[in-house]
Image (spheres, rainbow, N blue to C red):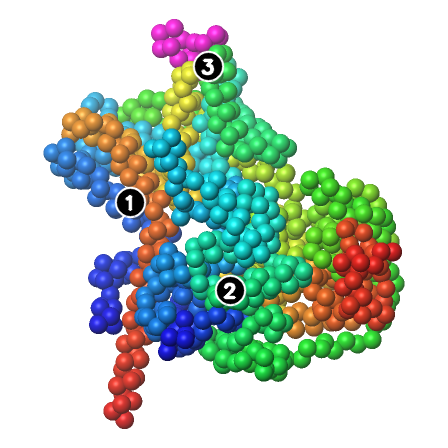
């Protein structure tokens, strides 16, 4: 009885296996699987609103400049939408890379938003309010961003090394400290009475705004050019350099790191400094690129979303390029989607949340696949034995 | 038929790539101590995990008290009065002993007559009674984090007894204990049998089986080799059966040939992390071609001596000279480069990065040097080449060669990898701490041969072990450490095992 029941493998499992059974491709196939599941689940939510999910998903893509809208305002086209999407993509990539460097080395940098704010603020008051020519101001902004973010990160690392304070606690606390101290300075010295934000910067903006080109007016995020080289650099640092090897050992096993002669304290500080430096890049590309001012008393959501983006990208720098793109398309397209579909814009966050929820199930999916594979190989083995047995009897 | 309380018939269990149990049948009588003997990876733990409901067998059937059962979970096994003490204890660190024992089956009380609560006071009482009845004295109100390993084990045993287990499975219970604690545990096990419990003991230590077991089943590579009566079988016969070939208990040792002095430790004093002085004014020296062994009961400061020499722990006073150079103030890395190889006590927590590949682990002490690293960039080919060479030379077995994740390898092969890596450093001084702990006879033999070969090549060797047989078998000079002090140092041939044992217990004061 029992044998017969086991003799057929569940067709769902069989399908599972043929799609994501390959171990080597699982790092890509499992996130993709999670994305498909969440799009399906998102479609159900949209259906509950009584709207057509396909039109909704198309409008996400239209809103972020991936496919053309039916009509455009003057001086606007698919290209302007696309460039605007790239503009908000840039800080997301840097922020997610910051989270990835920390996670890969056994640390959790939840203070990316705070580090972004410090870098953005200091770059704003030093270079942003100056009248330096762009060729000097822009590189200077980047350097200041890297240094300030790196210093904030290194400080967190040093606290962990010196006083053994968990980096999660210090980075959350520093988030508050940065947020309120900086808003004090903005409100006291740099506030714009109309917008209630800091005064707009006058030099060093990393995004060129309303540039006339091809008869259009578009934003050109210059710092985007840096994202791909820096992602590759991070990949190289982690996988191919002595420093990356040491940082990863410290992250995986501190005792073994000490045993092999690595200076554990210095490594923790270095990891957090690199992570903070990347967060600093995210900060300057957000506050001196996408925006040109700082809203006091708020931390940007980019720093927190980036944790999820990083996990969706499997903590892999190249994976992060794609996961950032996906999440940015959804959030950037939500405006347009909402206006034409008459669905609340927050649905975009629901879908983003679903993607992350399903991608967090990656380990479970991997386990299910392994289980299905084991069942299949068992069946094969039994089938072979059966044939052997029968053959033997006949002979 | 019903004289057998447990019967496992034709059990087969496959995992991807291996057959862990292949048509194994055993029957255990009520009220006996039944031992399962086998090398690491022979399938003992898998077989018992199926009895305890952690896996289900692919083929075969299990009968408990003559009735056929499908044990689907540990909770189900508990209902059937089966209990298991795992090799790695499963306790909640910041709960008290009582809380851990009643967890899942808490007696209820009503505060003020209606508020439901766990009856901790009543449980405390019940636990102390239970512990007295079986001679397992514990203080039920102590927290797990405050008690030592052997007491934790008692808590695990009490947990089974509290759940009224009649069939008790012990998975390698002595691996973590000191010699006296082992004797004590074996007494407890005997006592449990005498009070009518059935005991299944998983082990690869022959003396223990000889000591307590009534019958013994030998597993080898997943297959049952035989079941025998312990009283009428010699240890040697059991060992041969277990390994599947002839085992020699004596190691061939060439006469010693000492050279110049390599290590000189003068007045070493070490404090541990809690600030307690654990090594007190210890002095000794080791020459080329000499195996200097430190014997002692666990926790008497011997690991700290090794950690201080290798630089993992700072020494608070004293001097360490390597080849005449003062290394007392050097970092771990500098000491490694000056000439120290170190095989640490805890191979998984200290000696290896378990989630790294085998080739990465085999380069753990050299990755920063050419040819592994040029201008800060790692050279993959050098890692691969080094890995392949060591796997070949030291017969390190793994699923996917150099790309295998070390976590998936067996303990014996993990240790082989560490030893290969450390020998390849060609250091003047090699420190071995508990090099054969938890390994099976075949692997132990191999490691003993390696240690002797290194000695014959003229290295100075510091061996720290809890196994007296190992020390007597290998050492040229023996030092006994007791309570952080070096009690006695003498050439090995002038000491008998009994004398060393007496010093270890601190019986003979200086």
Is B232 on the left or on the right of B117, as rendered? right
- Dot 3 corresponds to which residue? A183
Q: Which mark is residue B195?
A: 2
* Quadrant occupied by the N terminus of chain B: bottom left
CA gap between label 1 and label 3 equals 38 Å
Circle number at residue A35:
1
Q: Please tell me which residue is depicted at 71% across the width and 43% down the height of the picture.
A: B272
Residue B358 magenta-drawn? no
The magenta region covers A186-201
**Quarter of the image with the C terminus of chain B in it:** bottom right
The residue at the point 85 percent across, 61 percent down is: B489
The answer to whether tags 3 and 2 share a subunit is no
Question: Do the residues at discs 1 and 3 belong to one chain?
Answer: yes
Residue B39 versus residue B361: which sits nearer the camera?
A: B39
Rendered residue at 86%/50% (across/down): B266
User: Which residue is the extreme one toward the left?
Assistant: A50
Left or right: A384 in relation to B398: left
């Amino acid at each position: 009885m029992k044998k017969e029941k086991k003799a057929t493998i569940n067709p769902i499992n069989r399908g599972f296996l043929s799609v994501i059974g390959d171990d080597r491709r699982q790092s890509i196939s499992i996130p993709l699987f999670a994305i498909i599941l969440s799009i399906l689940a998102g479609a159900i939510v949209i259906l509950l609103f009584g709207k057509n999910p396909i039109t909704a998903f198309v409008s996400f893509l239209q809103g972020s400049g991936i496919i053309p809208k039916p009509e455009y305002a003057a001086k606007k086209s698919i290209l302007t939408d696309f460039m605007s999407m790239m503009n908000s993509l840039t800080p997301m990539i840097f922020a997610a890379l910051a989270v990835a460097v920390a996670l890969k080395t056994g640390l959790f940098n939840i203070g990316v938003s705070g580090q972004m704010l410090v870098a953005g603020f200091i770059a704003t008051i030093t270079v942003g309010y100056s009248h330096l020519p762009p060729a000097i101001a822009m590189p200077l902004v980047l350097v200041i961003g890297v240094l300030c973010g790196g210093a904030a990160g290194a400080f967190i690392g040093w606290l962990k090394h010196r006083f053994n304070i968990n980096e999660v606690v210090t980075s959350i606390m520093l988030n508050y400290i940065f947020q309120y101290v900086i808003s004090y300075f903005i409100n006291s010295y740099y506030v714009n009475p109309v917008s209630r934000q800091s005064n707009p910067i006058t030099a060093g903006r990393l995004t060129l705004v309303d540039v006339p080109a091809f008869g259009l007016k578009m934003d050109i995020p210059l710092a985007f050019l840096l994202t791909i080289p820096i992602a590759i650099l991070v990949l190289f640092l982690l996988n191919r350099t002595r420093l990356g090897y040491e940082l990863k050992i410290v992250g995986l096993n501190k005792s073994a790191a000490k045993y092999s002669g690595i200076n554990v304290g210095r490594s923790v500080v270095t990891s957090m400094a690199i992570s903070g430096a990347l967060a600093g890049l995210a900060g300057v590309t957000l506050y001196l690129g996408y925006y040109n001012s700082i809203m006091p008393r708020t931390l940007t959501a980019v720093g927190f979303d980036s944790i999820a983006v990083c996990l969706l990208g499997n903590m892999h720098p190249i994976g992060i390029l794609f996961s950032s793109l996906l999440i940015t398309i959804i959030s950037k397209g939500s405006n347009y989607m909402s206006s034409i579909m008459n669905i609340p814009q927050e649905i975009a966050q629901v879908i983003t949340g679903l993607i992350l929820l399903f991608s967090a199930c990656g380990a479970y999916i991997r386990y299910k696949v392994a289980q299905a594979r084991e069942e299949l190989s068992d069946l094969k083995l039994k089938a072979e034995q059966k044939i052997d047995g029968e053959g033997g009897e006949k002979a | 038929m019903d004289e057998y309380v447990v019967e496992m018939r034709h059990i087969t269990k496959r995992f991807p790539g291996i057959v862990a149990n292949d048509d194994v049948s055993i029957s255990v009588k009520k009220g006996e101590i039944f031992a399962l003997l086998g090398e690491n990876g022979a399938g003992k733990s898998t077989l018992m995990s199926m009895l305890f409901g952690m896996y289900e067998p692919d083929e075969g059937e299990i009968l408990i008290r003559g009735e056929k059962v499908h044990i689907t979970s540990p909770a189900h096994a508990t209902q059937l009065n089966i209990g298991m003490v795992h090799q790695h204890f499963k306790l909640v660190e910041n709960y008290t002993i009582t809380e851990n024992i009643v967890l899942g089956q808490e007696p209820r009380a009503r505060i003020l007559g209606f508020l439901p609560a766990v009856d901790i006071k009543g449980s405390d009482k019940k636990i102390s009674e239970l512990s007295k009845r079986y001679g397992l004295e514990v203080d039920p109100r102590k927290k797990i984090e405050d008690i030592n390993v052997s007491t934790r084990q008692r808590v695990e045993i009490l947990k089974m007894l509290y759940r009224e287990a009649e069939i008790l499975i012990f998975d390698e219970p002595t691996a973590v204990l000191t010699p006296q604690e082992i004797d004590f545990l074996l007494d407890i096990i005997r006592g449990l049998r005498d009070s009518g419990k059935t005991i299944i003991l998983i082990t690869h230590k022959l003396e223990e089986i000889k000591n307590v077991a009534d019958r013994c089943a030998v597993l080898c590579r997943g297959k049952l080799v035989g079941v025998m009566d312990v009283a009428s079988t010699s240890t040697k016969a059991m060992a041969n059966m277990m390994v599947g070939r002839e085992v020699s208990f004596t190691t061939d040792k060439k006469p010693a040939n000492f050279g110049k002095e390599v290590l000189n430790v003068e007045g070493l004093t070490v404090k541990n992390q809690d600030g307690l002085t654990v090594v007190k004014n210890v002095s000794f020296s080791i020459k080329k071609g000499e195996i200097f062994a430190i014997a002692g009961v666990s926790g008497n400061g011997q690991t700290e001596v090794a950690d201080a020499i290798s630089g993992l722990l700072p020494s608070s006073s004293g001097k360490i000279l390597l080849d005449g150079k003062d290394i007392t103030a050097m970092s771990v890395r500098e000491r490694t480069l000056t000439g120290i190889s170190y095989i640490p006590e805890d191979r998984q927590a200290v000696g290896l990065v378990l989630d790294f590949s085998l080739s990465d682990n085999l380069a753990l002490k050299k990755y920063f040097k050419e040819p592994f690293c040029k201008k800060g960039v790692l050279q993959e080919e050098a890692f691969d080449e080094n890995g392949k060479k060591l796997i070949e030379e030291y017969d390190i077995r793994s699923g996917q060669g150099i790309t295998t994740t070390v976590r998936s390898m067996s303990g014996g092969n993990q240790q082989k990898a560490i030893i290969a890596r450390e020998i390849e450093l060609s250091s003047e001084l090699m420190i071995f701490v508990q090099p054969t702990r938890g390994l099976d006879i075949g692997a132990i033999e191999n490691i003993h041969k390696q240690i002797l070969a290194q000695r014959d090549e003229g290295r100075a060797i510091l061996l720290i072990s809890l196994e007296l047989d190992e020390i007597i078998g290998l050492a040229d000079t023996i030092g006994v450490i007791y309570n952080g002090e070096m009690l006695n140092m003498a050439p090995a041939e002038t000491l008998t095992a009994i004398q060393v044992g007496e010093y270890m217990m601190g019986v003979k004061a200086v």
